[in-house]
């Protein structure tokens, strides 16, 4: 559970690298250990996909990062052999930026009632 990992190791997180994958083993034909097959091969049991299109619970992760007060660098490691990078990379960036805009509840409350808000 990546969100709990963030909470458990809050004092050791100095950089966040966003990369996503999708597991596809529900049809009984594929296993998780199909890494010998080329990326994007439909027989693989898992594959890297554009960030935000996989199984990583990104919103939970960013809420956990906000909870621990993380304000360090965030990067996207984009790998999706089934999608054009000129579409996928900007889409992933926009997705992560939207999640990074999630404001912790206390900060949102304080901003709503400040003289500057």
Image: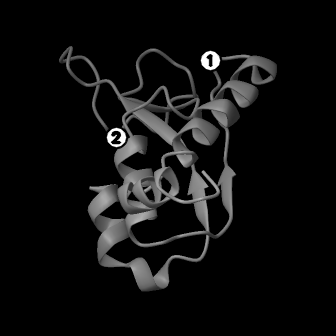
Q: For residue 82, which numbered disc appears in the image? A: 1
Is the residue 29 above or below the residue 51 in the image? above
Tag nearer the camera, 1 or 2: 1
Residue 53 x, y percent position in the rendering: 48, 26
Q: Work out whether mark 1 precedes mark 2 in sequence or the reverse, and give the earlier one.
A: 2
Q: Is residue 55 above or below residue 116?
A: above
- For the point 48% across and 72% down, the residue is 69
Q: Quadrant of the N terminus?
A: bottom left
Between 108 and 19, the one nearer to me in the picture: 108
Q: Identify the residue shown where x is 60% and y is 69%.
A: 71
* Residue 47 located left or right of residue 75: left
Report the side of 58 relative to 90 (left or right): left
Total residue callouts: 2
Q: Quadrant of residue 14?
A: bottom right
Considering depth in this image, is 68 or 104 the residue closer to the camera? 104
Which disc number belongs to residue 98?
Answer: none
Q: CA distance from mark 1 to mark 2?
A: 19 Å
- Which residue does the image show at 64% across and 41% down from the upper left? 97
Q: Which mark is residue 33?
A: 2
Give the residue at the far right of this rendering.
86
Q: Secondary structure at mark 2?
A: loop
Crowd tier of the residue under label 2, counting other residues whose Cα lies within 10 Å: few below 14, some 14–19, many 20 or above: few
Seen in the picture, residue 29 relative to 33 is either above or below; the reply is above
Residue at the far bottom in the pictured view: 11
Percent of width and height locating residue 8:
29, 76
Q: Residue at x 27, y 31 (%)?
A: 31
Seen from the viewer's position, the closer of residues 100 and 55 is 100
32, above or below 12, in the image: above
User: Which quadrant of the view contains residue 74?
Assistant: bottom right
């Amino acid at each position: 559970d990546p969100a709990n990992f963030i909470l458990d190791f809050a004092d050791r997180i100095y950089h966040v690298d966003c990369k996503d994958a999708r597991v596809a083993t529900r049809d009984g034909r594929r296993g998780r250990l199909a890494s010998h097959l080329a990326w994007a091969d439909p027989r693989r049991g898992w594959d890297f996909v554009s960030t935000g299109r996989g199984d990583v619970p990104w919103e939970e992760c960013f809420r956990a990062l906000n909870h621990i007060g993380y304000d360090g660098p965030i990067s996207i490691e984009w790998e999706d052999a089934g999608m054009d990078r000129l579409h996928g990379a900007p889409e992933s960036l926009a997705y992560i930026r939207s999640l990074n805009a999630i404001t912790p509840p206390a900060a949102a409350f304080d901003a709503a009632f400040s003289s500057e808000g």
